[in-house]
Amino acid sequence: MLEQQLLNALTLGSVYALFALGFTLVFGILAVINLSHGAVFMVGSYTALALVTRFDAPLWLGMVGALLVSGAVGLLTDVLILKPLRARNAPHLIPMIASIGVGIMLTTTAQGLFGAEALRFPEETLPAGEFVIGEVHVRALEIAIVAIAFALMAALFTILKRTQLGRALRAIAESPKAARLMGIHVEALFHVTSFVAAALGGIAGVLIGLDFNAITPGMGQPILHKGIAVIILGGMGDIRGALIGGLFLGFAEVLSKAYLSSQMGDAVAFGLLFLILLVRPSGLFGRKLERKA
Amino acid sequence: MRFVPKSLTLVSALACAGIVQATDIKFGVAEALSGGAAQYGVAIRNGFQVALDEINAKGGINGNKVQLVIEDEQGKKEEAINVVKKLIFQDKVLMIFGPTLSNSMFAGGPVANGAKTVIFGTSNTANGITDIGPYVFRNSVMESDVLPVTVATAAKHYSIKKVAVIYGNDDAFTKSGYDVFKAVLEERKLPVTTTETYVKGDVDFKAQLTKIKASAPDAIVCSCLAEEAANIMTQARGLGIKAPFIGGNGFNSPKLFEISKLAGEGTFVGSPWSNTNPAPANKAFVAAYQKKFNAEPNQFSAQAYDALYIVAAALKDVKLTGDLNADREAIKNALPKASINGATGPFKFRQAKAKDGKLGGWDADQKPFIYVVKGGKFTLYDGK
Amino acid sequence: MQWLNDFWSTYSTLVFTVGVHSLLALSIWLTLSCGLLSLANAAFMGMGAYVSALLTLHLGWPFPAVLLAGAVAPAAVALIIGTPVLRLAGVYLAMATLAFGEVVRITLLNLEITGGPEGLNGIPLVTEGWHIALLLALTLYGLGRLRRSKVGRAFEAIKEDEVAARLMGIAVDRYKLLAFVLGACIAGVAGALNAHFTYFISPREYGFENAVDILTLTVLGGTSSLVGPLLGATVLTLLPEVLRFLHDFRSLVNGAVLVLVVLFLPKGIWEPRRIRAWLNRRKGGQA
């Protein structure tokens, strides 16, 4: 049973990490806690669903669509709402509240367009295939989620560490003003980051939507809570932190459900979170919040 | 600010306004049309609308058209209270249907009861609802009437010696279902190999299911809502668990097998309603619902549909005087005697036992049908 | 007169809720005024609600005693966790208090005595308008006095620059704890009052969303004076009711209002400086 539980923890942790990647990007680079990320996740799911069911598109096209539409939502949020707030030097609570409003609007629109009932992907589109290795069972979809989470993290990490773009982003994360003085197009990169982060959320939405296969307007909320826990655990604004934090949370949850009691799963997760914050506030990899202007 | 909403409720309200007569019968409907419980509230509202169209097409109740004043209580208890008060004191309705969640009924029910107005829940299954008072009615069959029969039938069919249990422990509906299951299992002296829980929003049940698998039960008892149930079954099969499932009220949804396909084969569910029940009243309802909404109805719609018919039947022999308080009393006195043969089968009320000397409200008195899943559909269990 | 009667019958709960939300907004205002971003007040509200409801239901205590218990219980907890937690600052404090809130909510969900997810029902209707009005008035008076006192000045200093304040000899940790505990007190009273006019409480009312909602009430109203939280609470509580005619579009407009206020009224609705400037502009135009 232990091997199966470990595998369960790996897939669950990857799900959390995937969601947290976009969330932590926005926090690290834009210094905003974007509480509409859960809604963006949901938008990705619905987009893929609509493309697949109404336009008979293949799944990969649905995912591309989800990427583009979610990314667009993130971009619009940045251009229309976050940018004016930046210009005004609003304290960090304010964009967070605005993002709540955006989340509500997205959820209501989704309900208006698709109804409140849980929808699902048609049987044919789900990747089939199950593997049995000894006592351990795993589905192809779960392998895909783990693989994609790791691949995306590796890709993002490489971009950040090895490319010009990455250096520019890291400079902005240190200090936007200094970056601007060095000639970096800060505003443009903010837009790019918002797009990419939201697109990542959208992809996570499709994958997790396929896994759970009950798509509702409110599906982003519970994952948002976990996402916040992940980035605190892993350190806000750090890509590795999102992955490690996600895995950590997945393992903590699964193992406490397996060996303590299934009721303790959430309590353990948040209790751990609380304790870690007391002992090491910046999380496992985090940087201090005080950003030099 | 000029505003042109496209919502169905406003359109139907306007349509009704077009034919408003002085003797229109007004009922209030308080359901969760937004928020977490929206999928149930909307299904319920749809069920009411199908029944409303049919009743009004046949001339209404005693020649008077029926009008539904529909409000969104958002699944929040303060909203439930606000909406109930508005319907009673501002819209001056004769009685209220709803709210959707048991929690909301606990908040809004006392208000209606105190104002001597009937409040009729179609989806509240928690314990203690009808203890609120004699003006509280519900036609949602309690788990304690259904589950013992389900478990008995399944246990016999599969020769079950031990079961594992899984349920959602942060939802009043699934938790109270679990309490009933637990009592039933104890009474039948069926040992429980392990009891697992999950919370709303969990996407992954493999941790719990792996534990269940290791405990080798003959069957798995599930007190879950449809979406989670579907995923639990799918993930269980994915882990190699072969044991059949025994489901509570939450399984009553055609969606269940859309999602889980063959993973649910052999599942036993007890319910007063299923979309495959061949009774003529049900077939007519399912057809009418599909025509109007281009979707399949579920148990919530079916019970709402029946509820309006129950009230219509009760009012058939009642003369409404136009005096609001007298009419509300008249409904409260006539309703307990109502009985119909609706989409959910034969129905009548049963008074809840008096508690602490207070008179109780009225519960549903219905026998459940036991269904087993064959070929991805609910089929009536016939002993084989 | 009948109209007034009907109006009160319909809207009394709404008015009570405005009062309770005002208390909650003030509890957050208090912690914010000391520079603390605490998201634990929903959990404290829950503690006050449950403790008071259990005392009423099982022990039949009189209402004033129950209210007192509802204030003291969360304050005691705040005292215990305050010292370690308040060492954190900024967003980290917010997240820690959020995590704490979740732990409280899950505990409430799993205890037998709290009724688990089914909550507590049948709580008698004891709260009356004057209870809320009186407690709100007392809180406003107390906080107003606090602002102008040595304590209030210490809070401001800490909010501006904690390090400098410490260097000046202000007992920073003790003042932060005071703000935290008092905030918990007020939130607990709000919870107790609410439990006794809504007949029913359950853990899901005291979670993450509610904590964020309370924060929104305050920030939207404006934090520069005591008027802000009251205004924010009133506007945001009444808004869904006022927008009822929009039916399915209600939530959409609600969300849009949030975004618009944040964009166009950055320091909240009640911001004396902006209002004065606007008034002056008008006067100047007429001169």
Image (spheres, coloured by chain):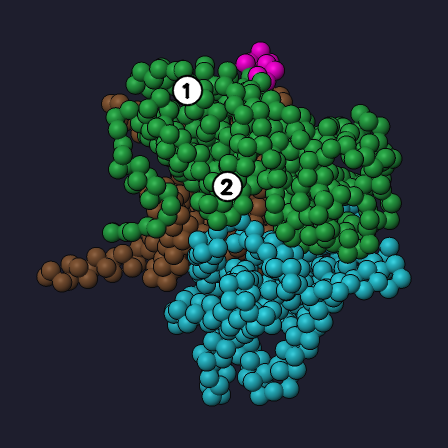
Chain colours: A cyan, B green, C brown
Tell me which chain the residue with mark 2 is part of: B
Name the mark nearer the viewer: 1 or 2: 2
Residue A164 visible? The answer is yes
Residue C23 visible? The answer is no
Highlighted range, magenta: B351-359
Query: Of helix, strand and loop, which one carries label 2?
Result: helix
Lower position in the chain sequence, tag 1 or tag 2: 2
Return the residue nearer the eye: B222 or C88: B222
| Residue A119, x across and y down, in percent | 56, 54
Q: Is residue B355 magenta?
A: yes
Count the numbered circles shown: 2
Tell me which chain the residue with mark 1 is part of: B
| Three-letter residue code for mark 1 | Leu
Horizontally, residue A18 falls left or right of residue C66, namely right
The residue labelled by disc 2 is: B287
Query: Of helix, strand and loop, which one carries label 1?
Result: helix
Q: Does the magenta stretch include residue A64?
A: no
Disc on res. B315: 1
